[in-house]
Image (tube, rainbow, N blue to C red):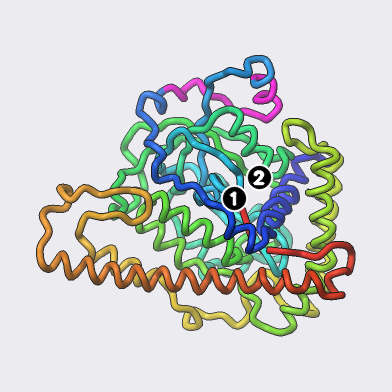
Amino acid sequence: MTTDSGSCAMAAAHEWLASQTQPSQRKSTQIPSSRSIPQICPSRLHTTEPARPLDIATIQNTLQTTPETKETVLYLAYGSNLSDETFLGARGIRPLSQINVLVPEVVMTFDLPGIAYKEPCFANIRYRNAPAYPATTDGPKQNTNEYHKDRWHKPLVGVVYEVTLKDYAHIIATEGGGAGYQDVLVDCYTLDRNPRLAVPEFPQNAPFKAHTLFDPAGQHRADPSYAQPSARYLKLITDGAMEKGLPYEYQDYLHQIRPYRVTTTPQKIGQLFFLAFWGPIFMALIKFGGVLFAGKDGRYPAWLATVMHVCFGAAWTSYDKVFKPTFGDGERTIGETDDDLNEKAPLIRDVIERYGVGGRMGGQMQDDSAVGPKSADDDLLLQDYQMRLRLLEQQNKTRLMMARQEQDNQVDRDDAPMAGMGGTGIGGDGV
């Protein structure tokens, strides 16, 4: 068993563990804002041509031999690292500069398995010329037309952060303990700062190189598109897209992705038993195994990654063979249709099409001169926009409250006798 095979398990366990932050801890933490971070200057972008893939061992060697190095890394974020709460808050990274980008050679997927009934899947990337469903996956491929998360067919939209070499080492270490994730270079194209513009299929400006991390193989489910991300995880991505002022067209897509929800009593019982048994095991491996065996660079040894891989595979096998047949689906919401949810995408699209006044949505500022002088109609549109934005925020709060309620219920169960099965209890929020 290689460390590559354990990368998926390590990353998923880290993501799940980050979601266990207690509500009181979240409220007491002041999350930094990325709005004051400057744009990456063009001269820095043009110095990336000789760039090469990096690994944490090479980075640590550089930091040891030249601790005062001024070298920086351009890092592409596309999932929860878009969010200030995750990237600046939980991970503690302090970018020197940032810029919104388009990456034609890859597309974001949600095919990184997580923890059934809690965090079913996480974001990953794949090359656009690679098959969406590898021949090695088991079981029949289902009709992907029903999957909202697969409806984006344009290039990946994300943010490139300029970070110090030390911070980049920390990013790798917190993305699965440096076990198996590959650092790759991708061609990025800067996006126009006007988020109302459509995302181009074929950008015309000159590209630059940036580093990003992805799991090329790892462990995947029979249908990589089947699982739905949790409301908590999806909110990190949508919040990050708004904070960074990504194109409204892309925000539209993100908001129509439906989160996983526990909707039946058997699912709730299955969630309780599954997390009560497997939760303490993963928590012990990450928390105590990390403290005892992780190196100074934050990397886990190969044997620990292998143990995590075996446990992760066993957890999903128990889900497939026992929990799902007995308690119901832990990856997709049961009984959900398009009519069951108040979809935000049409509302967002209508606001974008009608709103023509310069202003701020997310982190990017529009100049009034770019859209002409204001009029009485503009003021009415602005009021309409603000009303609709408040409605969107209320819907986001509802989604967040639903996720928080699950976490609070889990916290309450920590003190119950059932939570004592297999070790310590489970808590709830983070990456």
- Helix, strand or loop for disc 2: loop
Q: What residue is rendered at 61% in x and 68% in y?
A: 142
Vertical arrangement, residue 181 with respect to residue 208, above or below: below
- Contact flag, marks 1 and 2 (Cβ < 8 Å): yes
- Could you say which disc has been placed on residue 124 in the image? 1
Estimate the x, y position of residue 102 in percent, counting from the top left: 41, 44
Outermost residue, right side: 422
Reply above or below: 179 against 281: above
Q: Tell me residue 177's x, y (percent).
A: 72, 41
Q: Give the quadrant of the N terminus.
A: top right
Residue placed farthest to the top in the image?
65
- For the point 44% across and 78% down, the residue is 342
Q: Is 53 a magenta residue?
A: yes
Relative side of 59 to 366, left or right: right
Pick the front one: 125 or 41: 41
Instruction: Specify which label sits upstream in the sequence, 1 or 2.
Output: 1
- Chain part drawn in magenta: 47-62
Q: Residues within 10 Å of mark 1 (few under 14, many from 20)?
A: some
Q: Is residue 168 above or below residue 374?
A: above
Q: Report the side of 364 relative to 93 (left or right).
A: left
The foreground one among 137 and 88 is 88
Q: Which residue is mark 2?
A: 215
* Residue 416: x %, y % from top left: 82, 75
Q: Is residue 187 magenta?
A: no
Q: Nearer the viewer, residue 117 or 155?
A: 117
**Identity, as a three-letter code, of the amino acid under mark 1:** Asn
